[in-house]
Image (cartoon, helix red, strand yellow):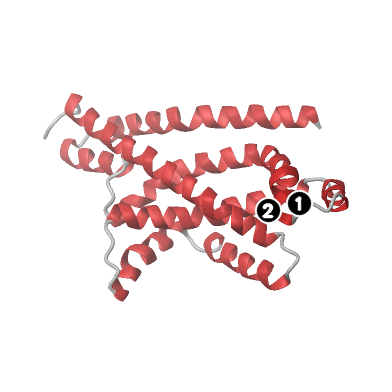
Amino acid sequence: MGKFGIGELMFLLVGLKWTVLLSLVGFIGGAVAGLPVALARTSHRRIVRQLAGAYIWVFQGTPLLMQLFVVYYGLALFNFSLNAWTSVAIAFTLNASAFLGEIWRGSIQAVPYGQTEAANALSLHYLVRMRDVVLPQALRISLPATIGYLVQLIKGTSLAAIVGFTELTRAGTIISNQTFQPLIIFGVIGAMYFCLCWPLSLYGSRLERRLAATR
């Protein structure tokens, strides 16, 4: 039976690195895919809104754990053999796009309708209207909720261990099985998650207070 030392701490830091990378990939990929989802949810065409709504319902209405299983094991049935990193990156991107799309949909609809009417009066094209008038205001409104979701995404990366991806939690499990010191190891892991999430939560709270004061 080993002891928790420098070597084990370095292994945890490697897992932390993959946790951060997975969070960034999922968040950035989800943001890129989530914006079209949000725009589709606010479209004037009913069929477009319904398709985007169905997409969101699927990913919000099913557990992330199941989505990881479907991507990792389900695609293999169609001869798409993906490694653990690619599978979890795809799953987290799809999941994040649904949640961010719904957050941003609410923010777009929260922009005063008079802004859109003024843009229409100036005969601005839809893309120009969204880019220059609506989305900058919607982004500002959505920042606290977006940061809050990022915190949840960071903590949710621990589920990637279920398909064999070695992020922070799985790294801790491996070391715990070798050293039989789970309280120390998972105490360190908890501290690492806290150092990642607490500053983001604090920043989101401050933004929320600033927006409330501005309104």
Q: Is residue 159 above or below residue 68?
A: above
From the image, tell me which residue sits under label 2: 105
Q: In the picture shown, does residue 212 fall above or below 49? A: above
The label shown at residue 84 is none
Residue appearing at x 38%, y 59% in the figure = 68
State whether residue 156 is above or below residue 50: above
Tally of numbered discs: 2
In the displayed structure image, the side of residue 189 where residue 131 appears, left or right = right
| Label 1: element kind | helix
Query: Seen in the image, is 192 located left or right of residue 118?
Result: left
Q: Residue at x 28, y 50 (%)?
A: 165
Q: Mark 1 points at which residue?
A: 109
User: Mark 1: few, some, or many residues within 10 Å (few <14, many ≥20)?
Assistant: some
Residue at position x 31%, y 52% in the image: 85
Position in image of residue 110 (x %, y %):
77, 47
Horizontal side, residue 112 vs residue 10: left or right: right
Looking at the picture, tell me which residue is in the foreground, 2 or 7.
Answer: 7
**Secondary structure of residue under mark 2:** helix
Compared to residue 6, the image places residue 70 above or below, namely below
Amino acid under disc 2: Arg
Q: What residue type is labelled 1?
A: Gln
Q: In this view, does 210 lie to the left or right of 149?
A: right
Marks 2/1 in contact by CB < 8 Å: the verdict is yes
Q: Where is residue 163? Give x, y as percent.
A: 30, 57
Residue at the image point whose x is 54% and y is 48% from the top = 31
| Quarter of the image that includes the C terminus | top right
